[in-house]
Image (cartoon, grey):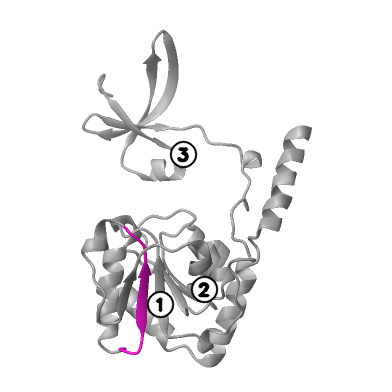
Amino acid sequence: MEDNIVIEQEITDRKTVYEGHGKIEEVTIKNGEKETKREVLHIGNGVGAIIKDTVKNKYIFEGLYGSDSKIFFSDKPANKRDKTFTFIGQLVERKGIDILIKAFNKFYNNNPEWKLNIYGRGYYSKKIHSGNGIQIHDFKPPSEIAKILRNTRFLILPSKEDHWPLVVSESSLSGCGLILSDKIGNIPEFLNKDNGFVFRYNSVKDLVNKLSLASNMSDDELLKLTKVSVQLGSNYLPIHWKIKFCEIINFFVND
């Protein structure tokens, strides 16, 4: 490995490392007089990534995030809601807003009765405009967002990277259907075959297809969709956070 290698990142997923194309070597990293030996993935061109020591599973706790049902809750059947898709988030490339606009424009050509409401602010604020079924709004406080979600059929989140977006939890608890890119980290918690769709991120074609499938769901399917979303969303409430936090305290007291 080159003597002047630059450490640009840390990697915790060893499976990804070993399936990659880099070469793993042990190197000595100097920090003043202190020297430590670390495994480094040699990426090439003088760039490397430290393979960070992983945390033991017993020290990883899940279920510490969620939504307040006193604000976000609705069991209003999806078929009784307006034919609306809603996006809530930053208007930046990482959120996939460019993909969403392109996909909805294609979908809208054959489905002019559907609307897309966008709530957010960011780089694309001055690049996208209301029209052709699209309405652009600024960010709103939680109480107003809750009202919006209670009359939304589907939340759309086309992110290119998103670990645990809270809006998915809020929308699920509000009884919305979910249309999420495959880069959304909390899909396992809130989405299954009965309450929404997953599409390939960056794929306008796949998103258009999922919008079409969503728009053609029957009343019975929409009724089930709302029930499933509320059920999944109800697994992540403040009371569950309280219980989990107490478990963590007891764990470390007795560890």
As displayed, is residue 252 above or below residue 165? Answer: above
Depth check: give the residue in front, 205 or 64.
Answer: 64
Q: Position of residue 73 (x, y in %)?
A: 60, 71
Give the residue displayed 65% in from the left and 60% down from the top: 237
The type of residue carrying mark 1 is Phe
Secondary structure under the numbered disc 1 in the rendered image: strand
Tell which of 41 and 95 is nearer to you. Answer: 95
Which of pointers 1 and 2 lies earlier in the amino acid sequence? Answer: 1
> Quarter of the image containing the C terminus?
top right
Q: In which quarter of the image is the N terminus?
A: top left
Q: Does the magenta portion include 120?
A: yes
Q: Mark 1 points at which residue?
A: 85
* Residue that label 2 marks: 147
Where is 241 relative to 98, above or below? above
Residue type at numbered disc 3: Thr
**Magenta residue span:** 111-121
Camera-side mark, 3 or 2: 2
Return the residue nearer the eye: 187 or 157: 157
Q: Position of residue 46 (x, y in %)?
A: 23, 29
Q: Name the residue under label 3.
A: 12
Q: Identify the residue shown where x is 42% and y is 55%.
A: 162
Residue type (three-letter) at the residue carrying disc 2: Lys
Q: Quadrant of residue 247?
A: top right
In magenta segment, residue 84: no
Answer above or below: position of 13 versus 86: above
